Amino acid sequence: MLSSLIADYRIIFERDPAARNGLEVLFCYPGFHAIAIHRFSHQLYRWRIPLIPRLLSHLARFLTGIEIHPGAQIGQSVFIDHGMGVVIGETAVIGDYALIYQGVTLGGTGKEIGKRHPTLGENVVVGAGAKVLGNIYIGDNVRIGAGSVVLRGVPSDCTVVGVPGRVVHRSGVKVNPLEHGNLPDSEATVIRLLLDRIESLEKQVETLQEAKQKELETFSSAFYQSCSESLLTSTGKTCRLGDREIEEFLGGTL
């Protein structure tokens, strides 16, 4: 347990550029405090000592805002950054070198008995507010974007974003946890592609309308002229891709 605490202490200096000195980490990092209390309560939990492990877990939640069930298994060099609102369930397993931001939930679906919480491999990064639910396996070197909801297993060396979480990148390389902010926005990308498709279709419709108008203009009859005007009037307004709301949304996400 002592070697694990030392590893947890050292990894903070590698993962957090705001860590200035040792005393600051010892007294001002709730993530480190929560993991330290958990390692002790987890050992008592393994010895089947009743009540006390849960009391220690509850005390850690009160002091740090981080709730870790004493039954959860946490590897070495795990860093919970900021940590407020983090919830880690009883049967959750977290591999070495994991980085977990505030608001993360490693929870169950509430319908299963036994192993009902996720298992995280090594060097996994879970962004702020992400929810990983159920008895699923998250492979090594996986990045989970902030606010994502992951309900299915994820293979190694992938990036997951969105609700529900989707694999958007297979890097095949080790994840740099400090580059967690450089994640693609798959929803905005899809919206942009759909809008481009709509614009293309609108141009085709406009071309057909112009051809039809020229054809109708060749007839001198007032009857055909009125039909032409009626046809053009019935097409209505097209989607203006330059609308401010659309441009602001896409400009802020792409």
Image (tube, grey):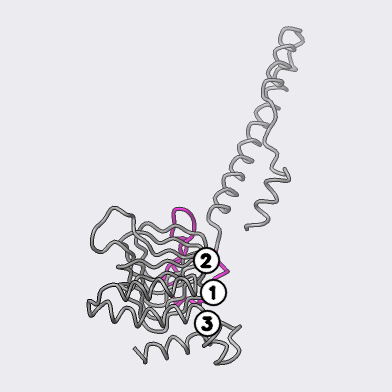
Residue under numbered circle 3: 15
Within the image, what quadrant is residue 78 found in?
Answer: bottom left
On whether residue 86 falls in the magenta region, the answer is no
Q: Is residue 111 left or right of residue 29?
A: left
Neighbours of disc 3 within 10 Å: few (<14), some (14-19), many (20+): some
Residue matched to label 1: 82
Looking at the figure, which quarter contains the C terminus?
bottom right
| Disc 2 element | loop
Assign a secondary structure to mark 1.
Answer: loop
Q: Does the magenta segment cover residue 177?
A: yes
Q: Residue 128: which numbered mark, if any?
A: 2
**How crowded is the residue under tag 1: few (<14 C-alpha within 10 Å), some, or many (20+)?**
many
Please name whichever residue, 110 or 137, is drawn nearer the observer in this view of the structure.
Answer: 110
Mark toward the start of the polypeptide (3 vs 2): 3
Residue mark closest to the camera, 1 vs 3: 1
The residue segment tinted magenta is: 157-183
x, y percentage for residue 224? 71, 10
Residue 213 found in image quarter: top right
Picture layout, residue 165 above or below residue 33:
above
* Distance between the alpha carbons at the discs numbered 1 and 3: 12 Å
Total labels: the figure holds 3
Q: Say which amino acid is labelled 2.
A: Ala
- Residue type (three-letter) at the residue carrying disc 1: His
In the rendered image of this protein, does residue 11 appear above or below residue 182?
below
Cβ atoms under marks 1 and 2 closer than 8 Å: yes
Of residues 120 and 241, the one drawn nearer to the viewer in this rendering: 120
Which residue: 55% across, 92% down? 22
Say what secondary structure mark 3 lies in.
helix
